[in-house]
Amino acid sequence: MHKAGCGVMRILTLVGLVCLAACHTGGGGAAGANEPAKPPGKIRVVFKHQPMWGEPEPFRQLLAGFSQENPDIDLVTEVLPNASDAVHQYFLTSLEGKTREYDVFIADVVWVPEFARAGWIADISDTFPPDGVKRDFLPGPAEAVTVEGKTYALPWYVDAGLLYYRTDLVPRAPKTFDELVQFAKAAKQKDPSLYGYVWQGRQYEGLVCDTYEAIWGFGGESMQGKRVTVDTKEARAALTYERKLFTEGISPPSVTSAGEEEARRTFQDGKAVFMRNWPYAWGEAQKPDSPIKGKVGFTTLPTVNGEPGHGALGGWQLALNAFTPSWRREAAVKFMKYMTSKKAEVALAIHYGRNPSRKDAYKDEGLRKEAPFIVDLLPVLENAKPRPVTPYYGMLSDVLQSEFSAVVSGIRTPESALDRAQKFLDHVTQGGS
């Protein structure tokens, strides 16, 4: 699930993580350079991950299975907060300090190019060649962990944007942008209190995801070669469409300040016909006390020509700390292989709703029986696309958030906003060179 936290608690979390990282920034360079000698006894591997949420026992059993298969490895797990930006800052600080305090860690899909360029995560192509990753994992996640032809992480579990719709209010799932508008208007004519379409329009990363989905829906791409391109006719069409959702009354003004949860609550309260959100919202909509339980369908996002749309790729990867001593690397890689195996991914899907990144997991009979919704998600996940795969993504996203927000709020035209954004992107990335 992709959510942006805020407020005092988030700030305190960030400050605490930075302090913790400062304490963990030991000296030394990359693995092999003045690394400490191997101590006697078991090889200690430290895994940093975010909370699973839910009953902890299945996750403990999964980890225990690795320990039983590898009695010579002492596996230590350490839980991070759930706030993505705070975790990102923690890794920035500790890895900049060349820490060796942990070996395997989770990385958001957009962090991999940034960390690879900085030399903070290890090239694991020797064990996981790109061709093998592309063969075993879904296309979007495989692309996201491959940087300049080398593998820098392993996909762990995956997320993607999708369209939810009220099955009792529309004749079928819309395939095109025009159909979405048409169906929403028809439903609103019957019940004027309804909103047509709620989505993530606030100035934050969610808006970037939603807008790229619209750009792809109009036939655009995130990049041309190594250049991040947004000043295109497809992007202008996408932002024009998003703005028209407000001017034609399909999306309420509140969407310009909405994130995932605001959209979900509005939709789940029965107040909207359509919603763009992540897969987590399905489970919430099906809870016993949900007003829309049994009245919701989901599908790929609409496009201009009716072809299945591309949802923005989300999810988490497993990366290897580049400063892990060479004598710990083999053990750490074993753990990465175990945690991205079919067995592990199916267990995480059944018990924690984590959508597998491995292709073969979706053929598992246990998963089909215990979590049919996840299996049904496969077409959405197969069609997911990553946001621009660039080491500069963090800086670019800040500008895109601002410019996209200015358009949906009616402050700037698509032409003006995209021209401004493109100039900044080219300046930062030197045109992709």
Image (cartoon, rainbow, N blue to C red):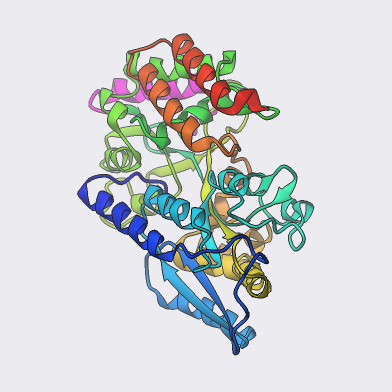
Q: Residue at x 54, y 37 (%)?
A: 311
Provide residue 153's location: percent of width, then percent of height: 63, 55
The vertical placement of 264 against 241, above or below, is: below
Q: Residue at x 58, y 61 (%)?
A: 321
> Furthest residue to the left?
8
Q: Nearer the viewer, residue 431 or 301?
A: 431
Q: Quadrant of residue 264?
A: top left
Q: Which of 173 and 224 is in front in this view?
A: 224
Give the residues in magenta: 173-195
Provide residue 225's location: percent of width, then percent of height: 70, 28
Q: Which residue is drawn at 31% across and 28% down?
A: 255
The vertical placement of 275 against 193, above or below, is: below
The vertical placement of 195 against 411, above or below, is: below
Q: Which of 287 and 247 is in front in this view?
A: 247
**Residue 194 belongs to magenta span:** yes
The vertical placement of 101 against 118, above or below, is: below
Do we see residue 292 in this rendering? yes
Do we see residue 172 in this rendering? no
Q: Quadrant of residue 331?
A: bottom right
How many labels sit on residues? 0
